Image (tube, rainbow, N blue to C red):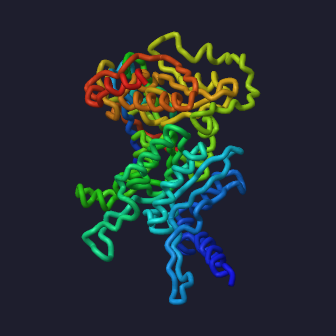
């Protein structure tokens, strides 16, 4: 008598988990220019550093002999690994299984990923592609929704996200259609990025919108990059998945691993007393002539270190991260080429978000001031500019 | 016989037309400033995205324009 049979089953489950949703589903994923979730994790992390958690979680169906017949893995993959030698937690939906809409084990694992990051006090990265729980009727009783796991309103599901946001850096990427709860996860981040041609972000997808509002819009029209680069939902639009991973790695490089630490000071070969001749002439003597504030920021901070955020959202104010003498700093600046650099409602929200990020992770803030004040006019009044503006001022 | 392509130039900001820098019939290259619009006290040069010959100026100095409003028509120069 030995445990050989059980050990063999564990081995088989792990093997079956790696099969994702099958060869056809993987092929389809690739044909659309997208990676599978495990390929994404491998591309994001330091080579060979990923340690997967809960690989054998899923639904097992036994045959008449009591042996493992079929195994449907959890459609969420998670674990710990390293980025630039620093430990991080990572998780993402497996779109090849149920289109990323959570199965029971997948939902549980997606919540566990947040706990993992908080418990280990390491940054959390979410690689998102999937819808929320289905509200359509199930096979057994079409009148009842076939949702899985605990009710969506249960406290722990949101509480842990809030805790993660207040304790560790959270970066999320939309790498395919992201709707419902995953879309909520995407914005519950300190940095969110979407791929230009292969991702869409929607609270409710096309079918839901048509049913509720009678409007027929496809995914791209509803929540493509052209919508969200200006909506403020994402901080950046990436050319492709590799670019999204590069941006996440770069973003995390400016931050400490958690709020109990300070950001790492990187080696810097840019002399601290470097003084650029161009700075003498960028600002025109004629005060009514616009100038390129972004160029000024780039010339002042460590060479190549400026990482702008939400460039097309509230463009009258520039925000981003950078380094000065190797130390991470937050940047805010007025861009007079857009409404003279006035604080619009959108620009104010962008600025407040940056200030809160710096506050959470103890980054100094450097402000390049060319401030005409709050935007005025009927649009500004309608947009509630004074409320958002004051919130930014008091952040 | 081919018809030359018409390029529509739209205001990039809302404001008052301060100065028009090119006359009808004048050729502009991509990036040239066609007119200056005052917005929030700033003098914002409206650069053309593509080169062409100015065929119609739809506004004059002192006019109020809205962002996106057509302000000029150019005729594309066959390449």
- Residue B74 vs residue A334, the one in the foreground: A334
- Residue at figure coordinates x 63%, y 29% from the top left: A328
- Residue B73 vs residue A50, the one in the foreground: A50
Answer with left or right where residue A134 lies relative to residue A90: left
- Residue at figure coordinates x 37%, y 27% from the top left: A344
Please tell me whether residue A308 is drawn above or below residue A72 in the rendered image: above
Q: Quadrant of residue A371?
A: top left
Please tell me whether residue A136 is drawn above or below residue A235 in the rendered image: below
Q: Quadrant of residue A19?
A: bottom right
Please tell me whether residue A103 is drawn above or below residue A309 in the rendered image: below
Residue B27 appearing in the image: no
Q: Position of residue A202 (x, y in %)?
A: 38, 52
- Residue A322 vs residue A161, the one in the foreground: A161
Q: Quadrant of residue B12?
A: top left
Q: Position of residue B75 (x, y in %)?
A: 42, 39
Answer with left or right where residue A45 lies relative to residue A78: right
- Residue at figure coordinates x 55%, y 26% from the top left: A331
- Residue at figure coordinates x 34%, y 35% from the top left: B68
Q: Position of residue A293 (x, y in %)?
A: 53, 23
Answer with left or right where residue A121 lies relative to residue A2: left
């Amino acid at each position: 008598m030995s445990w050989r049979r059980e050990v063999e089953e564990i081995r088989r489950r792990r093997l079956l988990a790696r099969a994702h949703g099958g060869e056809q589903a993987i092929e389809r994923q690739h044909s659309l220019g997208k990676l599978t979730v495990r390929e994404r994790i491998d591309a994001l992390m330091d080579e060979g550093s990923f340690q997967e958690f809960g690989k054998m979680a899923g639904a097992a169906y036994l045959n008449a002999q009591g042996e493992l017949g079929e195994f449907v893995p959890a459609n969420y993959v998670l674990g710990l690994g390293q980025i630039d030698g620093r430990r991080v937690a990572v998780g993402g939906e497996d779109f090849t299984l149920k289109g990323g809409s959570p199965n029971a084990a997948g939902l549980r694992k997606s919540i566990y990923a947040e706990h993992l990051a908080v418990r280990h006090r390491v940054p959390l990265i979410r690689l998102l592609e999937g819808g929320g729980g289905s509200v359509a009727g199930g096979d057994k009783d079409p009148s009842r929704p076939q949702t899985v796991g605990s009710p969506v309103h249960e406290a722990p599901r949101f509480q842990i996200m809030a805790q993660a946001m207040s304790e560790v850096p959270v970066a999320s990427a939309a790498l395919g259609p992201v709707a419902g709860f995953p879309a909520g996860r995407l914005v519950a981040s300190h940095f969110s990025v979407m791929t230009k041609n292969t991702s869409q972000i929607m609270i409710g997808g096309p079918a839901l919108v048509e049913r509720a509002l009678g409007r027929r819009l496809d995914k791209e029209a509803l929540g493509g990059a052209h919508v969200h680069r200006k909506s403020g939902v994402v901080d950046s639009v990436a050319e492709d998945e590799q670019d999204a991973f590069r941006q996440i790695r770069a973003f995390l490089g400016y931050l400490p691993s958690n709020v109990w630490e300070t950001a790492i000071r990187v080696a810097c070969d840019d002399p601290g007393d470097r003084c650029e001749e161009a700075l003498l002439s960028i600002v025109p003597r004629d005060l009514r002539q616009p100038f390129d504030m972004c160029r000024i920021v780039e010339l002042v901070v460590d060479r190549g270190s400026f990482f702008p955020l939400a460039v097309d959202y509230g463009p009258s104010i520039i925000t981003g991260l950078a380094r000065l003498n190797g130390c991470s700093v937050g940047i805010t600046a007025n861009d007079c080429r857009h409404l003279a650099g006035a604080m619009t409602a959108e620009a104010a929200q962008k600025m407040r978000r940056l200030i809160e990020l710096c506050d959470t992770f103890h980054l100094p803030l450097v402000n390049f001031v060319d401030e005409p004040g709050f935007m005025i006019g009927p649009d500004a009044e309608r947009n509630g500019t004074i409320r958002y503006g004051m919130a930014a001022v008091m952040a | 016989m081919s018809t030359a392509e018409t390029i529509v130039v739209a205001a990039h900001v809302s404001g008052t037309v301060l100065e028009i820098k090119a006359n009808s019939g004048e050729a502009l290259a991509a990036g040239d400033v066609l007119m200056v619009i005052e917005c929030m006290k700033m003098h914002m040069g409206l650069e053309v995205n593509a080169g062409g010959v100015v065929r119609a100026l739809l506004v004059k100095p002192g006019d109020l324009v809205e962002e996106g409003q057509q302000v000029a028509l150019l005729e594309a120069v066959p390449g």
